Every structure is written in C-alpha cells, then in structure tokens.
Amino acid sequence: MTQAASSALPLSTRTDPETQPIEAALVGAPNCGKTALFNALTGATQKVGNYSGVTVERKIGVARTPEGRQFSVIDLPGTHSLRARSPDEEVTRDVLLGRRPDERIPDLILAVADATNLRGALRLVNELKSVGLPIVLVLNMIDIARHRGLQIDHLALSQSLGIPVVTATAVRRGGLDALWEVVAPMLEAPLPAAQPATWVAPNSHDLRVAMREADRLVKAHVIQPAIPDTVTARIDRVVLHPIAGPVILLVLLFTMFQAVFTWATPFMDAIDAGFTWLGTLVAQVIPSGLIQSFLTNGVIAGIGSVIVFLPQILFTFLFILLLEDFGYMARAAFLMDRIMGRAGLNGRAFIPLLSSFACAIPGIMAARVIDNRRDRLTTILVAPLMTCSARIPVYTLIIAAFIPKTKVLGGLSLQGLVMFGLYAVGILSVLVVAFCARFFFARTERSAPLMLDLPDYKMPRARNVALGLYQRARVFLRRAGTVIFWSMVAIWVLSTFPQPPEGATGPAINYSFAAMIGKFIAPILHPLGFNWQIAVALVPGMAAREVAVAGLATVYAVSGDGGLIHTLAGQWSLGTALALLAWYIFAPQCISTLAVIRREAGSGKWMWIALIYMFVLAYVAALITYQIAALLGAG
C-alpha cells in the first residue's frame, strides 16, 4: 500500500455504521448510466461543487434504503482505468487510493457497468479489486440488454469475480430492487475493514492480459442472441456512413439554427410586448425624472433587451439535450474525428466544442476527457471561438436590424441563413486556429487514436430534457438578475451623470461620463466603423457578451431615441453592423471564460495567450470587414 493510502485508511475502516455515515462511491466508465443511478439514489439531495485544487466536478448526495437507512453517495468522474490519463480519471484514482488528504476513502464501491457492453467494465472491476475496498457490481440498463436478447448469468459471474453482482434499471420505478436486496443488509451490519491496496499502474502488457480475462468472463457468463437486435446497427449504418453521416450532421445543425429564428419568434414577440407594456406602465405611474429614467431606460430597457432572447437560447439547448439523450453525440464525435484530426484536434474535442455552443465554460471544462495535454490545451484555447448562447442576443439584434425577414431558396429564412453562416464561420475559425496551433506546440507525446463507446439509441426522456431546460433558463435568468442588472445600473449612472449644463442643446448623454469614456476609446475603434456608443457598450460587455446589447439599449434609450432595432438601422451603416458581427465572432468578451481557461490550463500564461490572440483576431476581422464594406459603398 502506498504511504498516502495508508495514512488515509482509518477514515474508511469502519466497525459500526452508527458512528459515521457510510459513503458509497459510484465508479464506472462514461456512458454506463452512472449519473442516472446517482440521480435515482439521491433524488433532490445532491450537492455539486469542485474538488479542492482542481475544477473537476464533485457530486455528492444522500440516499436512503427502503428500510430508511441513510448513507452518502459520491459520483466519481467516469474512468476506464485507474491508470489515469486525464484530470477526471486522476481524481477518481486519488480518491479511491486515499491520495487526496481532503477526501475520505469511500467505505464501499458501487461499480456501475453497462449491461449491454460488459467487456470494459469487467476489466475495470478486476482493477478495482486491487484497491482493497468492498465492491458491488451493478449491471445497469439490464432492460436494454434483455431486449437485445442478451442473457447474463449474474450469479455465476458473482462467483467468478468473488463480489456481489446485481442487475438494475436506474431510470425505471422498481429498477433498484435487486440492488437494495444486496446493499441494504451490508449497510445494517459493520462493513469489512479495507484491505491493503495492491494496485500498481498497469502497463500495456497488463492491460492486454486484463482484457483477455474480461473476454473469458463474458464468454463464460453472457449468452449472445443468435440474431441480435440490430436497430442501433441499422441506424448506425446510415448515420456513420462516410458520406451520408456528415450530411445528416450538417442538416441537423442547419435545422437547429433555422429553428432558433422561426420557432422562437412568437415567444420573443410576447416577451418584448410584455417589457414594452411594463415600461409604458412605469412611465405613466411615475413622474418624469431620475427614478423614471432609471426604471424605464436602465432596468426595463436593459434587462428586457437581453431576456427577450431567452426563447432562442432555450431552443438551442433543446436540440443539444435531445441529441445527447438520443445517443447521437458520440456518433457526431466519431464523424468529426478525421476532420478535426487534420486541424490538429482530437476527435474527443467535438463534444467539448459542441458544449461550447451553449457556453464556453462547460465546454472548456469538458476538455478534461482528452488524454493528450497538447490536444487538451488546444481545445481549451479554441473553445471560446464557438458561437456560445451569449452571442445570440448580439447576433439576433444586428440581424433583425439589417437583414430583411424574407424567404429564400424555397422558403428558408434569410435571417436564419445568416445566423447559420455566423456559426459556420465560428466553427471554421476553430479549425484554422487549431491547425495553426500545431506549429507552436512542442509535440512531446503522440495523440492516441479516438476510442469511443457508442451507446444504444434511446428515446429522450421528457423529464430529463425539461429539467435540463429549466436549469439552463434558471442560470440565464439569474445572470440577468445579477451581472446584467448591476452592469445596467453602472451604465445608467455613467450615461446620466453629470447632468447637462444650463442652456445645453444636445442630448443629455453627450455630457455624461459614458460619453467621455466612449469618446476617449472611439479613436482606437474608428477604423472599424464603431462609434462611441459601441465603445461604451463593449467595456461592460467584458463581464458577459450579452451585456453589450443591454448597454446599447440603455445608452440609446437615455439618448431619447426609439426602439433599439429601429435606432440601430437608422444610425449605423451596414459596414458597421457587419464589422461588429465579425468582432463578436472572435472577441473574448467574457471574464468568467478567461478565469476558467486559467484554472483548466493550470497557468495564467494560457489565459493571456487566449486574451491577446482573440482580441487581435477580432480587431483584424472587424477592420477588414468594415474596410471592404466601405469600398463597396456600405460604410
């Protein structure tokens, strides 16, 4: 046993379950149903945070047996081996071996396996046995395995492994009955003390031997159907086809961006009408003055201009959640592996980059699944270039002001096509920057080939999708109520004070601190076609990209102009609008993203590299766009 494991052993050696809550750790490979089991065990008692010193997610909850016995459950990050090739896997290994002084060693391991694909799980279980902790193997998704005609003799498998083996279906009522029959008695009696750990990092020979043993166990205890269920195989023959597969992926993404505009429009109109009515009501009730200006121009105009885009953001999330639940995401990563490999990215980078469509922060954190450090750093640095949901308010505002609502190519929305083009440019920029990064990174290790477990296709569960949408809407609205609100307060104050002197003839905002700041910055941005109002909006936009829209709404509302879309269409040139779109494709307008880059990359150096290269790209792209537009008479 290692010294670290030995020093932590008293925390996991228990003789009386009444003296200290028992802690069970869920361990398994990604996509084995471990999170579904965690949710089924803990319900609403979950707490989510990070392990100290790293940004790897830490999920812990409280479960109760049918008899009422309470115990803790910790959902360890997914791993294929304790060999630990990524930050997530390192945390799982260190917790089980007692190498994290701030974490107790679990009392019990619940090893979760996908019953339809036991080979890798059995190899992992044999490795876990060398940790020295009590283990129960949970064959999850047993209903799918039986539907496919698989027959698993779990009792004989239990005898071969020397540990309890139970079947489970975490997503169905009563699906944990067999698990409770084994685990509940273990929790009532004193658990056996942890045995000395004998684990050593396996080499390639050890892994081959372990896989042969796993194959032997599968052959001995799993009866394959004579004619297997080929529904998943039939679908995969189409969606993984080298020609049809990429076309299907492109159609799915194109449909998503069309829906963002067409399906969300009625909901956006309703929200806009609600905020307009609220602003009119406040103006009628409260006399003219600073209070009325603060409420109508600062709070309602500012926050309302951002919340109106919530339907588009939710429709984007809806597509992503449905594709995840259906089981398509792993296929998309497989399809993109060759293309991304040529650009210097690992195929596993597809899922972090696709997650960045919602927000770059979880996308950057998801890069932990990439083993190779060079590939992981490259993914972290390019993830902010993906078109996140915070850009949607900016893109939609400018598109609505300058792109007509017309149908082209047989009924397609022109605005939706422009939005699709912006997403496509973002994706292309990721590939180009990643390709260039290959020449700056020293190649100290060779990237491993992409190996993925392709889960069976499953119909998305409405509850999971609804819960995901609720959580994301809650995060967005909380952000609107905190970061955006206080940013609007600051912009309103800067735009209102000092008051214009007596006899002033121009708009009051021209005499404000905001005008002073904007006009100071404006000369730097003038070659891009940006005016001082845009300069004012870009400064608080560093807190969050969507704040720029609220900033423009506040600045122009204080100026006394009409609706924001109408105002921009009347005061900006097409070249200015296009240049601002080009700016937002590249600009790192989010302090939170930069902070996460610093933590995930392990050095402030990479944060500064990301900040500088994205600002340079943004400035150059906006400059070229505006100057070309000016030459064509649109400046």
Image (spheres, helix red, strand yellow):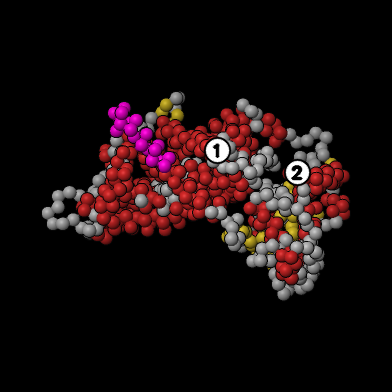
**At x 65% / y 41%, what residue is drawn?**
447
For the N terminus, the image quarter is bottom right
Q: Residues within 10 Å of mark 1 (few under 14, many from 20)?
A: few
**Viewer-proximal residue among 539 and 483:** 539
| Location of mark 1 (residue) | 439
Instruction: Tell me if I can see residue 416 in this picture.
Output: no
For the C terminus, the image quarter is top left
**At x 80% / y 42%, what residue is drawn?**
150
Amino acid at the residue labelled 2: Thr
Residue 442 in picture, x, y percent from top left: 59, 42
The furthest residue to the top? 410
Q: Give the answer, above or below, for where 364 lies relative to 570.
A: below
Magenta-colored segment: predominant secondary structure: helix
Left or right of 419 on screen, residue 342: right
Amino acid at the residue labelled 1: Phe
| Location of mark 2 (residue) | 116
Q: Nearer the viewer, mark 1 or mark 2?
A: 1
Left or right of 3 on screen, residue 613: left
Asked which secondary structure carries label 1, the reply is: loop
- Magenta residue span: 616-635
